[in-house]
Amino acid sequence: MNNSVQQLVAKGPWAAQERLGGFQLAAIAVCVGLNMLDGFDVLAMSFSATGVKAAWALPDVRLGWLLSAGLIGMAAGSLALAPCADYFGRRRTILIAATVAALGMLGSVAARDFTDLLLLRAITGIGIGATIASAAVVVSEYAPDRWRAAALAAYSTGYPVGATLGGYLTTLAIPTYGWRSAFAIGGIMSLAMVLIALWRLPESLDFLVTRRPPRALLRLNALLTRMHQPTLSALPERAGESAGRGGRVPLELLLSGRTLLAWLMFFCTMAAFYFSVSWTPRLLNAAGASAKLGLAAGVLFNLGGIAGCGGFALAAARFDAHRLQLLSLIASALLIAAFGMAVHHVEVALWTALLLGLITNAAMSGLYAVGPPLYPAAVRATGMGWAVGIGRFGAILAPILSGALLDAGWAPAQLYFLFSLPFLVAAVAMLGIGLRQGP
């Protein structure tokens, strides 16, 4: 076996010392596109919330459940289905899960009442949760060491791109075709991404080595050839290979001081972020803005998100991702409090929404930059699935709690001040991860 390839195999992820070639770029681009499903879905419900509330005369607490139902499904998909990718193949799991998400979104168009929509939102979330955790692992494997943090941060740009594109189309469609058009747009765009993934998404290299499915060596060599690397005469032994066999994942590979802190960071960051993205259009309406201005704020939030994720990706290519994430979390805490002060001043709030989207999306992209390297390759999809799933519980609780507090008489500004606290807790957790960094 070629010595350089032997070193690559021993080190993992793959192509650690190689350039970022066209094949790897295509694989990463497909994963970025798959992450757009999350943006399509969350914005579809957020932008249609006012129409759904009016159509079915729902109290805010029930609206909060609808905003959280997709996130409940995402938590279930991340915790229960993402680990399947370590055993049955990451490509296969992603394709099946993304198809479930697309069909759930299209099914939401025909929802007859609150219960129908609640169930379909959960089904959609299950598919998305399994998709995005597994796709992050594929990105981490196909990106060289030098570009890995940047590629993982770029992966998270899929969310604001999907949200902005879907949000823009939705703002055009809802006034004419009603709230159901938001789900139709998201479903069609999601099906398009499934077809692109079927065409261009490669299998995980680490999966082929650790699980050794039929024709594993042939499939591995075909991928190595496309990456312009030497082929192998036999499947190599890898440190920790046994962790990927036998159907059980040793807990010591998934639980450590750093990963427990990562769970806390994922939970708090997602709670504060999904409160912002789910409720901002509705809370601006409650503060006196028109429905059109509320939707515009949602679009500006996600336009800022594209710049935030892209900026984090560029910065991560030159600076330490852990420090960038710490700064992003602290800045997010300050900005969400500032938005609370500006929420009754519409023009100021619109520009603050743009800046808030930029910084909070940078913090979200940082989760995917610092998360996968915390886990061994054989259990990386399981590890990220658990981290994302636990983070989704924060995302689930935030919209429900917000709806209950609104019904109890809380003002929009008070909610924004409240949700600055989870960003501060996440910053403390990130500081702890940085202190524990090392062997």
Image (spheres, rainbow, N blue to C red):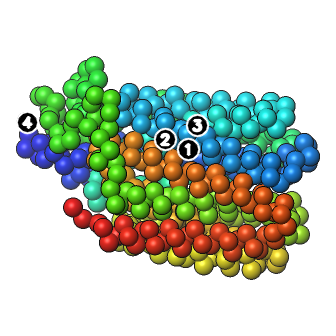
Tell me the quarter of the picture where residue 353 sits: bottom right
Circle 1/circle 3 CB separation < 8 Å: no
Q: Amino acid at mark 4?
A: Met
Query: What label does residue 126 carry, if any?
Result: 3
Kind of residue at badge 3: Ile
First-in-chain label (4 vs 2): 4
- Front: mark 4 or 3: 3
| Residue on which disc 2 sits | 79
Q: Which residue is mark 4?
A: 1
Disc on the earlier residue, 1 or 3:
1
Q: Residue at x 26, y 20 (%)?
A: 215
Q: Is residue 311 above or below residue 216?
A: below
Q: Nearer the viewer, mark 1 or mark 4?
A: 1
- Residue shown at 28% from the left, 19% from the top: 214
Describe the element under mark 2 as helix, strand or loop. helix
Tell which of 314 and 37 is nearer to you.
37
Q: Kindly identify which residue carries mark 1.
A: 75
Q: At 50% across and 58% down in the image, what residue appears?
A: 266
213 in relation to 73, above or below: above
